[in-house]
Amino acid sequence: PQVTMIHLPRVEATLAPLALLSKTVYLPWIKLEQPDVRLIRLAEDNNNWTFQLAGDQRTSGDSAPSSWSFRLDNILFDRGTIAIDDKITRSDITILVDPLGKPLPFSEVTGTKDQHSAAKVGDYVFGLSLKGRYKDQPVTGNGKIGGMLALRSASTPFPLQGDFHSGNTRVAFSGTVSDPLNVGGIDLRLKFAGDSLRDLYDLTGVLLPETPSFSTDGRLRADFKQKNRMRFDYQDFNGRIGDSDIHGSLTYTTGKPRPKLSGDMESKQLRLADLGPLIGVDSGKGTKKGAARQAGDRPQPAGKVLPADRFETDKWQVMDADVRFKGRRIEHGGTLPISDLSTHVILEDGDLRLQPVRFGLANGSIAGSVHLQGDKKPLQGEANLQARRLKLKALMPNVEMMQKTLGEMNGDVQLRGSGNSVAALLGNSNGNLKLLMNDGLISRNLMEILGLNVGNYLIGQIFGDEEVRVNCAAANIDVTNGVARPQIFAFDTENALINVTGTASFASEQLDLTIDPESKGFRVITLRSPLYVRGTFKSPQAGVKAGPLIVRGAVAAALATLVTPAAALLALISPAEGDSNQCRTILSQMKK
């Protein structure tokens, strides 16, 4: 571009004449009055700061280089301006540069305790302020830099300090640049803060998820010697995401086929809601999406309960990731006892895996893997999870009646589907769900505590107001094209045997279930007619089904035919439990 790179109203310099005798042009100092620098780049090879000098045209046959040398000890200037117009980075920035008056030692600005290391770093000489747009985002800030001549030293680190804002995102740093003319590397104490980690993408190019507000503080070291494969190490950082603490070290490497983020992170106190946006579940607390909801923009369809927030897969192919994460103590709601979350997150060309994912729940464990193929349109998803030995009394620690039981829950989930939200994935999913519960208790009071009005009604119809012991609850449910249909769904209680049939559609969120109760032995239950549960997941309706009474023995006879699904459920019971698990006895009898 035909734009002057630098305009100087006045230039002053001193010349040491005696040095001319030794063929040296020696300027002890040069002073530039109000320098006005304009840097313009229209394309990678089209800018106004690259010059072709006459000396560049020399060939190997030309005369030898001049025997004269040049020496400059200091560059002085009063207030200067640097204007940057860069079409590549979509930047339009104005920087004002002022002398500090007197140089400031590096240790005085940064608080560096290692005075020996700090002594090797040049002083801060200039202050600067910045305003404009970077990657189309507004940016403002201020900082300090070293002297102009310090830029030419490859052995003395060049000092940098800055504090910049883009919207509500803040980036603050202090440290050094090695070999500054060639930008050999950086060593900075770096702080980030903002509304969401996702906002850092426009400023840094690092793809991070939507989160609640965050802040971090760590050491950033980078090596730029290999320009086609630069490495950034953000070491030993500490911070917060929402109400969760976060610690660790991450490495970001540029290069082909894609940049890559790798490392380890840990949280001692993790609020599960702070991870919600990562899995397409917006907690509505602390995220910009949540704020939009509170303002009236509700992506969740009316009358639906399955999360409809879309997975943001459009940038999953921007970079790869290989990150291990641990969460020591997990907060979810008031009482749900989750602990020791660990997962290995692998993102490669839009293909995301959590493999494995493990966490402790109710003195038991849940483990498995989640696979989301974001490179497919629509997204393809698969989940394989196993729940083992979840203690009922630990699942409901505030329910007094459950503290009397030693029962446990075991289960398996194997589902695969396609869609760009949890609701869409489940809506056309295929797979299987298995669940076993032994030695439990149910009552109308329990259903009321849990807020399950339909359960309250059903138990009242079958058992009245009494507390009933559940020997075993067993479910083996096939899911086909988003419709769940039980092969077996039965409750064996001390008073009755209950069989559940029908369907539940994840796509329409509609229920159509029939509950058939049958008394055991000489015990009498309140109801001998089938019950129904119909309606939506959000507003189910229950009632007594019109028609003939249940024939005595019909429920037991129907369950006795379900040999294969019953045998499959036996695999959920640990061999270490022996015959103490009542579900083993009941399912073994059905298997026969």
Image (cartoon, rainbow, N blue to C red):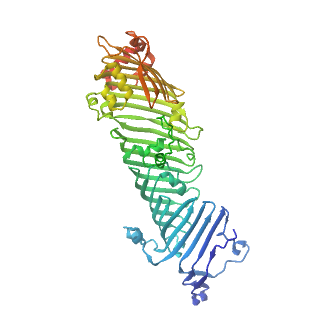
Question: For residue 239, which quarter of the picture?
Answer: bottom left
User: At 28% across and 28% down in the image, what residue appears?
Assistant: 406
Left or right relative to 48: residue 489:
left
Position in image of residue 565 (x %, y %): 44, 19
Residue 41, image x, y percentages:
64, 65
Give 360 or 85, whichever is nearer the viewer.
Answer: 85
Q: Where does residue 381 sit, x and y in percent of width and height? A: 53, 35
Tell me the residue at 51%/76% (across/down). 98
The quadrant of the picture occupied by the N terminus is bottom right
Q: Is residue 392 above or below residue 28?
A: above
Is the C terminus in the top left, top right, bottom left or bottom right quadrant?
top left
Kindly indicate the quadrant of the structure image that contains residue 217. Answer: bottom left
Instruction: Identify which residue, 285 or 170, lies in the foreground.
Output: 285
- Quadrant of residue 522 within the rendered picture: top left
What is the x, y in percent for residue 214? Answer: 43, 53
Residues 194 and 67: in front is 194
Pick whichever, 418 or 508, lies toward us.
Answer: 508
**Residue drawn 42% across and 74% down?**
105
Give the mark count: 0
